[in-house]
Amino acid sequence: MPLSDILARAAGLASEAGSGALKQLQHVRLPGVGQASATDDPETAARRWRAVTVLTDPEQLQAGTPEPLTRFGDRLEIRVTPAPGERGAELAARFRDRVGEDQLGELRSALREAKQRIETGEVLRNEPQPHGHRAQTPQGKVLDGMDERASKEGVL
Amino acid sequence: MKAATWTGVNEVSVEEVPEPTLLNDHDVILKVAQSVTCGSDLHLLGGYIPFMRAGDVLGHEFIGEIVEAGSAVRHRKVGDRVVGAPFAACGNCWYCKQEEYSLCDNGNANPGITEGLWGQSPGGCLGYSHAMGGYAGSHAEYIRVPYADVGTFVVPEGISDTRALFASDAASTGWMGADLAGTKPGDVVAVWGAGGVGQMAARAAMLLGAEQVFVVDRVPERLQQVREHVGAEAIDYSSTDVLAELRERTGGRGPDVCIEAVGMEAHSSGAAGVYDQVKQQLRLQTDRPTALREAVMACRKGGSIFTLGVFAAMVDKFPLGALMNKGITMRGAQVHAQRYIPELLERMEQGELTTEHLATHVMPLSEAPRGYQMFKDKEDGCVRAVFTPGS
Ligand SMILES: NC(=O)c1ccc[n+]([C@@H]2O[C@H](COP(=O)([O-])OP(=O)(O)OC[C@H]3O[C@@H](n4cnc5c(N)ncnc54)[C@H](O)[C@@H]3O)[C@@H](O)[C@H]2O)c1
Ligand SMILES: [Zn+2]
Ligand SMILES: [Zn+2]
């Protein structure tokens, strides 16, 4: 999600007028902030390698596709290269075919999971957790939605 | 169980919530003995970090007893009295290996939100909004702590709960500021903000060998604590010109190290104050950087500045020219508590570091709404409100 949208949503929670003013201000784009790519056309953006750096031996990672990336079968191209400065291995993937934002989101989330499994042995969960009574408000719904999508969004 | 939750802007409630369960093999469940308000919570309360959902449990600075441990927990056991780190850090990623625990790659279960805001996602913080991982906090009878071998520390018997409690955040944050700003023997250090964090930063600077330490604030009870419990010099910004005062007292040089422990709701008077308030309220700037601007102007040539105060996004009128031309190094970070807690506990045991005076108001969890009100308004000299869920 572009930074301007995040800030506008945030601002919208507090002031409608403020959010309007902010949107105006934000037409001056901050290149590259808050999104996978700010100026690429959608096709180029979709074709970019999504990558995570994993603190592990590159050779071990090259030996086989890590979980859960296997579930994409041969729809993915996968590339493993040593990371500079003893930072482990760069694990990158992209779809062979043209795909939409939903599938890119699945890929981001899978890359992050693969990294976590290798580094920590499991995938960190944050649900279900104790929380108090929640009224159904429009703002709450926006936030619940952001929460749900949060592992599928970002700059990868 | 009972928990103190965020239920709206400037609204804290105490309500009945489900008990936490082990979600990962590295988790423990802690029975919370004490949990304390932090200046960072005020930014959540005020709605400046708009990623809170009504019903979210607050709190990230805590001490308690382990009552349940996941199958992969190796170095902690049921019955241990432990203090917890605010940030969830895996201990295995590259950042954790550099001891930059609050930057852990695997600590935030919601990385997309902060990547959107900041270009990369730092780690996740307990009880600190959905942007920081969406974890329930410690103002509750029980809390789940992820990566417990890394994020909890057994407290030696000789240290009281109330002293050890602050190793969690206030003391480790203050220590980090003084340490990562590069404080060394002979330095002159100035700290903005005399809350728990600022006071602990000043104390750390002294223990790291600083020759002269100043703390800037305007709240009389806090300035008094600076003199009495920290042993630093207090500067009341409401009655003096801070820049002139610092120049006069440092032979015209300015401090070698400036530590900002105020954050995005800094107070200021006069036209600049009104300007910042209005811009922040219109959401044209998200943060008010008054103290940070002052630090840049005060800092000696070639000096260093550390931002401990929390900022969320954008600031306005930042004196970048002064920073660049004076050759200043500026850094900031969320607390790498895991890096400092062991040393702090040692110093606490030896009596070098005392923190009990910060706990000005101790009360049962059921009084959390009043505690936050007092903390926010600095009523009755409140520096920190400590909740005791067990009592
Ligand atoms: N980096 C971290 O990991 C971390 C950890 C804990 C707290 N924090 C942040 O550190 C800051 C301080 O925390 P705290 O718990 O001590 O908060 P606090 O609210 O108790 O104290 C803040 C102090 O700043 C003073 N102040 C306000 N405007 C000022 C100004 N212009 N000049 C000088 N002083 C001014 C206030 O009077 C108050 O005493 C907050 O922004 C908090 O979010 C950061
Ligand atoms: Zn804190
Ligand atoms: Zn980590």
Image (tube, coloured by chain):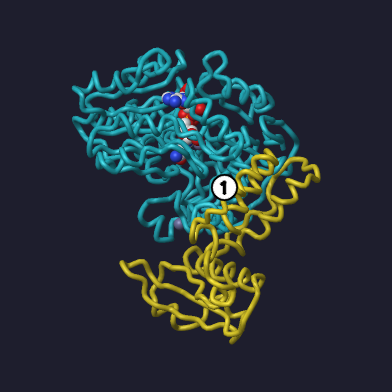
Chain colours: A yellow, B cyan
Q: Is residue B18 left or right of residue B73?
A: right
Q: Amino acid at mark 1?
A: Leu
Give neighbour class at mark 1: few <14, some 14-19, many 20+ (Cα, 10 Å). Answer: few
Q: Position of residue B335 (x, y in %)?
A: 44, 42
State which quadrant residue B325 falls in. Answer: top left
**Could you tell me which residue is drawn at 65 percent across and 27 percent down?**
B368
Q: Which of the image's four quarters has the N terminus of chain B?
A: top right
Residue at the right extreme, as displayed: A136
Residue at the bottom extreme, as displayed: A74
Q: Is residue B331 left or right of residue B104?
A: left
Q: Position of residue A10 (x, y in %)?
A: 64, 45
Q: Decide if residue B23 is in sight here.
A: yes
Q: Secondary structure at mark 1?
A: helix
State which quadrant residue A76 falls in. Answer: bottom right
**Could you tell me which residue is drawn at 44 percent across and 30 percent down?**
B290
Total marks in image: 1
Q: Is residue B128 above or below residue A50?
A: above
Q: Position of residue B251 (x, y in %)?
A: 18, 22
| Label 1 sits on residue | A25
Q: Is residue A127 left or right of residue B339?
A: right
Q: Which of the image's four quarters has the C terminus of chain B?
A: top right
Query: Ligand 1 closer than 8 Å to the CB at disc 1?
Result: no
Q: Chain of mark 1?
A: A
Q: Position of residue A63 (x, y in %)?
A: 45, 83
State which quadrant residue A13 falls in. Answer: top right
Q: Decide if residue B3 is in sight here.
A: no
Front one among B323 and A123: B323
Front one among B122 and B283: B283
